């Protein structure tokens, strides 16, 4: 019975497959940050990241609702972990951020955390995996809420109509009655709907 065991090989086998099972959140985080970056450039009107972040830290409505438990309830679980982690070992210190998230309601610190993790990864700095994981989990929850609100304002069906309108504009039939009716309907729908770029500044009653 003892002959079938080879402890050194068994240990290597366990380590090998355990390592292969680990999720690398770096690429996932960069992907979710691209979505976030595209959104905040629209809402802030700035292509300068530092300036845009400063403006984001003044957009408080969704964060007031978060602090009062009206939205993003599951986010606090992960932010609480970040509070403990960054207070034990700050991520990085700058003149505009101390590298720590002070409390679960420190949403401005969370915004800075997202940005700093992004900068460190893009510029090739080492970021401990747990920081990257928590950056991904927290930003994914935030963007899921933002995208959900945007989709409630401008649906996939609206987008399909907009694409159809764009096709008609380029076609020879762009002057017929169908085009005009579609154009009027879509314009009315879009104008009367909430501004999809301002969803973080709207109260949501659920």
Image (tube, rainbow, N blue to C red):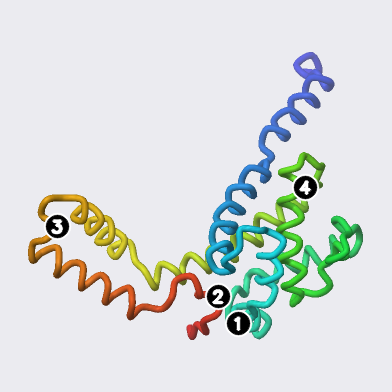
Disc 2 versus disc 1: distance between alpha carbons? 6 Å
Q: Are marks 2 and 1 in contact (CB under 8 Å)?
A: yes
- Residue 141 pos. (x, y %): 59, 64
Residue tagged 4: 120
- Point out the tag, 2 or 1, that comes first from the N-terminus: 1
* Quadrant location of the N terminus in the rendered image: top right
Q: CA distance from mark 4 to mark 2?
A: 26 Å
Q: Quadrant of residue 150?
A: bottom left
Query: Percent position (x, y) of residue 98?
Result: 88, 65
Residue on which the image places disc 1: 61
Which type of secondary structure does the marked residue at label 1 adopt?
helix
Residue 199 x/y as whole percent: 50, 75
203 vs 116: above or below = below
- Say whether disc 1 or disc 3 marks the residue closer to the N-terminus: 1
Mark 3 — residue?
Answer: 174
Looking at the rendered structure, the secondary structure element under dot 2 is helix
* Residue located beneath label 2 in the image: 200
Please tell me which residue is depicted at 83% across the width and 66% down the height of the picture: 96
Q: From mark 4 to mark 3, how far is it between C-alphas?
A: 50 Å
Distance of label 3 from label 2 (alpha carbons): 36 Å
Q: Earlier in the sequence, mark 4 or mark 2?
A: 4
Q: Residues within 10 Å of mark 3 (few under 14, many from 20)?
A: some
Point out the frontmost of discs 1 and 3: 3
Which residue lies at the image location 81% right of the left edge and 42% below the top edge? 125
Q: Disc 3 vs disc 2: which is toward the camera?
A: 3
Crowding near the residue tagged with mark 1, few <14, some 14–19, many ≥20 C-alpha atoms within 10 Å: some
Q: CA distance from mark 1 to mark 3?
A: 42 Å
Between 48 and 81, which is closer to the camera in this rendering?
48
Choose between 135 and 3: the one closer to the eye: 135
First along the sequence among labels 3 and 2: 3
How far across and how far down the image is residue 89, in percent? 90, 57
Mark 3 secondary-structure assignment: loop
């Amino acid at each position: 019975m003892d002959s079938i065991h080879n402890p050194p090989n068994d240990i290597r086998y366990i380590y090998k497959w355990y390592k292969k099972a680990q999720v690398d959140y770096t690429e996932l985080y960069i992907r979710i940050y691209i979505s976030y970056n595209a959104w905040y450039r629209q809402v802030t009107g700035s292509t300068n990241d530092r300036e845009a972040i400063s403006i984001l830290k003044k957009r408080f409505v969704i964060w007031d609702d978060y602090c009062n438990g009206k939205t993003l309830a599951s986010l606090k679980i992960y932010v609480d972990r970040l509070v403990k982690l960054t207070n034990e070992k700050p991520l990085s210190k700058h003149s505009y951020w101390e590298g720590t998230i002070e409390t679960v309601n420190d949403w401005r610190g969370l915004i800075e955390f997202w940005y700093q993790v992004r900068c460190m990864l893009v510029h090739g700095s080492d970021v401990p995996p747990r920081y990257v994981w928590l950056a991904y989990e927290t930003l994914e929850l935030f963007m899921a809420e933002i995208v959900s609100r945007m989709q409630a304002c401008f649906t996939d069906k609206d987008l399909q109509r907009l694409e159809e309108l764009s096709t008609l504009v380029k076609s020879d039939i762009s002057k017929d009655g169908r085009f005009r009716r579609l154009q009027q309907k879509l314009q009315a729908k879009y104008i009367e709907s909430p501004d999809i770029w301002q969803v973080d500044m709207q109260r949501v009653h659920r």
